[in-house]
Image (spheres, helix red, strand yellow):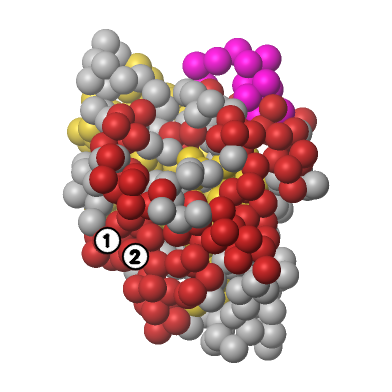
Amino acid sequence: MHPPSRRARRTGAALAACAAITMGAAATLAATAAPSSAAADCSAGYVALTYDDGPNTGTTNSLLNALRSAGVRATFFNIGQRAQQNPSLVRAQQSAGMWIGNHSWTHPHLTQLSQAQMSSELSQTQQAIQQITGTAPRLFRPPYGETNATLRAVESQLGLTEVIWSVDSQDWNGASTSQIVQAASTLQPGGVILMHDGYQTTINAIPQIVANLASRNLCAGMISPTTGRAVAPDGTTPPTGPPTNPPGAGLCTATYRETQRWGDRFNGEVRITAGSAAISSWTSVVTLRSPQRVSTTWNGTPSWDSSGTVMTMRPNGNGNLAAGASTTFGFTVMANGNWTAPSVSCRTP
């Protein structure tokens, strides 16, 4: 998820510096055991560190080294074309104990394509990564976070689980290392943070991110192909001791629909639905497509990030929902020429 212009912001100097990482580094990664958090206190749960848009010759090995030095694993959503062009970097990701997901073949606006084109974008990437690693991805992140029913049908046909995010690091938008660390500090159990393979600021943030997680008894884990949320690396949460919630507890889902449209704006509604157990509150993140802006909201209490495109909505009142129950909130979006539907996600505090 990033504006196409983000690649243009990479300076030649930064690329040259990162390019000094040789293929020998990849061999070193392959020869070293995968990181382990066995000694960590993960009593508060797990979060998922994710990196989009790789592999990149200038940064992937540096990113892997930083993750390994911090003793954490992450999920890499690779662009199919880049994976095909850099198979050794994909194998380095795999050897380093990282999880590898599908991020489409060319990083297009998939919701603007036909179903056949969507299928081609996803299936080519599945095949390329399987040929390199021996395993087809089970996770898919749509470019720009843009999705619709047609795309989800294609994902289902390919056995893929769609993964958006609960926190956007804004690294693609020029965020500094300290700003990336601050964004990561808002991660809650089960949450997923969006970052990218391509920025030195993102790599530099890793030690501080991991230290902050440890201070809150959180650990970096994998993304469940069942729920799309972060769980322990072996697929359970938590791996030891009694669970803080019964299976299915504390989960919620968010679904979006457009309810009305005018010449310059549209109304959207988000439905928040509790999982198989009651929840005491919820938080929904709505990510707009620049230059869209929200002019009005109802049935919730909003807050905004510095860009003005990411709205965090919390309930008015206590936010209690019984198992399977739902509630809605709404907002008016000034399109400013962009009619793309916003992406939405839900988490429980």
Q: Secondary structure at mark 1?
A: helix
170 lies above or below 98 = above
1 and 2 marks in contact (CB < 8 Å) = yes
Secondary structure that dominates the magenta span: helix
Left or right of 240: which side holds 177? left
* Depth check, front residue: 323 or 15: 15
Label 2 packing within 10 angstroms: few (<14), some (14-19), many (20+):
some
Label 1 packing within 10 angstroms: few (<14), some (14-19), many (20+):
many
Q: Is residue 119 magenta?
A: yes
x then y, percent, for residue 59? 43, 51
Query: Residue at the spot x=69%, y=85% of the render?
Result: 240
- Name the residue type under label 2: Ala
x then y, percent, for residue 110? 53, 23
- Label 2 belongs to which residue? 205
Q: From this viewpoint, is residue 87 visible?
A: yes
Q: From this viewpoint, is residue 251 visible?
A: no
x then y, percent, for residue 267? 34, 27
Query: Residue at the spot x=54%, y=87% of the render?
Result: 41
Left or right of 348: which side holds 225? right
Q: Secondary structure at mark 2?
A: helix
Over which residues does the magenta segment extend?
A: 111-123
Q: CA distance from mark 1 to mark 2?
A: 5 Å
- Label 1 belongs to which residue? 177
Query: Residue at the spot x=49%, y=33% of the render?
Result: 143
